Structures are given as structure tokens and as C-alpha cells.
């Protein structure tokens, strides 16, 4: 399973493609379960990068644990949650946050 991630160009925030827009929470991301869905997400990401909405567009591996979408790689877990030294700030301080890395 993969999701499309990028950084929003206006403020640098990590975002994930969800329901036709860019969401700040990985749990809302559209999940690609096959190559055709991955190709669709890649095309969406390329168009968004070309229109200067986002930069650093990538498909990343995710898993679903207890109904929550979680990135597989540590780097992506940190991008999804926020700073690792202060859990009271960043995305992990939100009630909708993904689990800590």
C-alpha cells in the first residue's frame, strides 16, 4: 500500500493527497492498493508540482494498524508526526495525530 506525500510550497508543511486535495494528516490519505492506483497518484503529484502547489512529491509505503494509516519508514513517521524532541508541539500534539514513531 502506498500514499502520495509532498511538502506544500506555500509553507513547507508535509501533506498527503486525500479526496482531491492535500491533507495535513496522513490518516486521511488516499491509499493505492495496486499499480494503476499508484500511477494515478503519481500523475496527480506531477500535476500539483508543475502548478507549484507542492514540492518533493513521493509515493511512500504505508500500513494500516488498528484502523490507522501509518508510514512504514522512520523518516516518513517523523514527517507525519512532527518533531521528535517535543511531543507537545507539531502534528503529534493534535488529537488526530498518527502514533509516535
Image: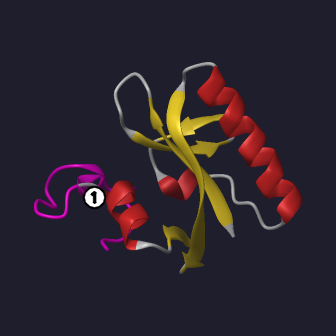
User: What residue is shown at x 50% (from left), y 55% (from top)?
Assistant: 26
User: What residue is shown at x 78% (from left), y 67% (from top)?
Assistant: 33
| Prevailing secondary structure of the magenta residues | loop
Residue occupying the far right of the picture: 36
Residue situated in front as seen by the camera: 40 or 31: 40
Q: Quadrant of the N terminus?
A: bottom right
Relative to residue 73, is residue 57 drawn left or right?
right
Relative vertical location of residue 55 with respect to residue 5 in this rendering, above or below:
above
In the image, the segment drawn in magenta is 83-101
Instruction: Indicate the position of residue 52 as horizontal and vertical percent values.
Output: 55, 20
Residue 91: within the magenta?
Answer: yes
User: What residue is shown at x 56% (from left), y 36% (from top)?
Assistant: 22
Q: Quadrant of residue 87?
A: bottom left
Residue marked by disc 1: 92
Q: Quadrant of the C terminus?
A: bottom left
Residue 97: within the magenta?
Answer: yes
Residue situated in front as seen by the camera: 26 or 58: 58
User: What residue is shown at x 48% (from left), y 43% (from top)?
Assistant: 15
- Mark 1: secondary structure: helix
Amino acid at each position: 500500500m502506498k500514499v502520495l506525500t509532498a511538502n506544500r510550497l506555500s509553507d513547507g508543511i508535509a501533506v498527503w493527497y486525500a479526496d482531491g486535495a492535500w491533507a495535513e494528516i496522513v490518516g486521511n490519505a488516499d491509499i493505492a492498493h495496486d499499480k494503476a492506483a499508484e500511477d494515478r497518484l503519481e500523475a496527480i503529484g506531477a500535476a500539483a508540482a508543475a502548478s507549484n502547489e507542492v514540492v518533493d512529491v513521493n509515493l511512500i509505503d504505508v500500513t494500516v494498524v488498528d484502523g490507522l494509516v501509518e508510514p512504514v519508514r522512520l523518516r516518513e513517521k517523523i514527517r507525519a508526526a512532527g518533531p521528535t524532541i517535543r511531543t507537545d508541539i507539531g502534528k503529534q500534539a493534535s488529537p488526530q495525530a498518527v502514533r509516535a514513531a
